[in-house]
Image (cartoon, rainbow, N blue to C red):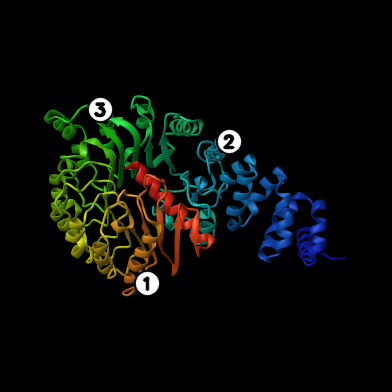
Amino acid sequence: MSDMSPPRLLHLAQKSLLGHEALAILSLDQLPREIFPSLFVEAFNRRLLSILKAMKSLLGHEALAILSLDQLPRVMFPSLFVEAFNRRLLSILKAMVRVWPFDFLPLGALMLWPQVDILKAVLDGLDMNYTQKSDCRRGKLHVLDLRDAPLNFWNMWAESLDDACSSEPKMRGQPVEHKGPMSALKVIANVYLTTATPDEFLTHLLQWVKERASLVHLCCHKLKISENLISSMSKILDSLEFGCIQEVQVNSDWQFSTLAKFAPYLGRMGSLRKLSLSHIWFLTPITPEDKVQLNSDFCSKLANLPHLRSLHMNSVDFLKDNVDLVLRYLKKPLETLSVATCQLSEADVRYLSQCPSLRELKHLHLRGVKLTHISPEPLQVLLERVAANLLTLNFMGCEITDSHLNAILPALSQCYQLTKLHFWGNRISMAMMEKLMEHTGKLSALRVELYPAPLESYDTEGDDQQERFFHLCTQLLDMLKRTREPKNAVFSTNPCRKFIYPLVFGRRLHTWYECHLLVHSVDMSTSFQIFATQICNEYVSDWLRL
């Protein structure tokens, strides 16, 4: 009789069973549950995929799945967590969070919309570690990320994991920092304040954090506001740690008085990198007294934002004649300046051309800013100053004339790093368009270039002439091809009185295409029809906002 111990016999039986794949799968329903963890590990190590798949289906049995967690290889956790999430196995999610073997859990990347039941299950699992003094030694979770992310984020993250590294992936750009195994939990979230705020998801999260203030650190990286009344969101704002906020987006119909009430909160956001303001207006024309209030209530607060590198202003009433007030308080040079559908005076543009905060500018967008009444010299000086670093330039709908374009062409031709150029919505003659092609032909880094139709494409009543338009565009693109192969070069007419959609003609990835009203096409594949449709929709959407 053999003197082998029962564990040894069990191990040999497992190895023998796994040697017969079909038999192993048929036997699973009859095996004692205590055998499953070690059997799963053995099957995983030997890459017996069909057995793993069969065993994985049995993980639908809640108690068995939870029993197996302590024995699972750590590399299996991400895929099993995703499956439990998709099947809404809340008890298993809760148990997995308790023994999560990585510092980082990107929960938000799985949620296409806020899911309160999932959040509650995960937070309950965290409570087992952080508030109930769990003796589980495997759980290492220190960062719960609730921000959204691309759909393939989990696949990319899981593939980047190995036994020596379990921290937040590089694509997030923020290192995971903690002090010891039971340091405060860091919860990263983007907060959206709307007229429907507070929603149940945000309410539950904030209450959970408040009740565990000594154990949990809530870090809001992006704050988006589309609420009109500060009073209705002040309680939520007061609960945030302003030093964590890196981006603020105000997309609401605010009077300046509302912005003035928000400004004290803004002035406390010392880590802010991007500020976007949209639709801020005064009830009456701005008086000298209003300028003093603007300076003290808003502009001066920008001095407290030493990391601000991106400033976006869309339909902001107070900007005209006050660009100097806004920009002079900046502590660091901007990388992005976007001004859309705002009125600027010549003094404003002249200040931009001299402003020290724009010397490192990489993205200059003046979409919908009417430049007809402004002399071209300040634009020329501005482009000359930023040419060495500029990556994107947007002059859509600026009513640039031949004289403006002629003045800035020498500076434009020096923007050798430029990758995107947007000139749609300007009325330029064919002769000047030919000069533009000569100068942009030198810019080999261009990936997207969007040009207006030459003036000769329209009849005397302003309606586009299709055959004439296509003929002129063919000539212009031929000029580009003499110096370089354009990648995405598109010409478009303005929407006219007959049709809301423009004519579009261009070259994408070595293929010519042309379309009319998104319906008529010549030699266009489906993918290029989709591309042209997207171009037209983007164009019309932008145009209607001007």
Q: SS class of the residue under badge 3?
A: helix
Q: Residues within 10 Å of mark 3 (few under 14, many from 20)?
A: some
Which sits earlier in the primary sequence, circle 3 or circle 1? 3
- Distance from disc 2 to disc 3, alpha carbons, whole Å, reads 39 Å
Q: Is residue 504 above or below residue 373?
A: below
Residue with the mark numbered 1: 485
Q: Residues within 10 Å of mark 2 (few under 14, many from 20)?
A: few
Residue with the mark numbered 3: 257
Q: Is residue 307 above or below residue 125?
A: below
Instruction: In the displayed orientation, state which residue is furthest to the front.
Output: 460
Asked whether 375 or 213 is in front, the reply is 375
Q: Is residue 261 above or below residue 249?
A: above
Q: Position of residue 47 (x, y in %)?
A: 68, 65
- The reply, left or right, for residue 108 in relation to residue 492 is right
Q: Nearer the viewer, mark 2 or mark 3?
A: 3
Which sits earlier in the primary sequence, circle 1 or circle 2? 2
The answer to whether mark 2 and mark 3 are in CB contact below 8 A is: no
The answer to whether mark 3 and mark 1 are in CB contact below 8 A is: no
- The quadrant of the rendering that contains the N terminus is bottom right
The amino acid beneath tag 1 is Glu
Asked whether 197 or 425 is in front, the reply is 425
Q: SS class of the residue under badge 1?
A: loop
The amino acid beneath tag 2 is Asp
Residue with the mark numbered 2: 117
Q: Residues within 10 Å of mark 1 (few under 14, many from 20)?
A: some
Q: Is residue 204 above or below residue 309?
A: above
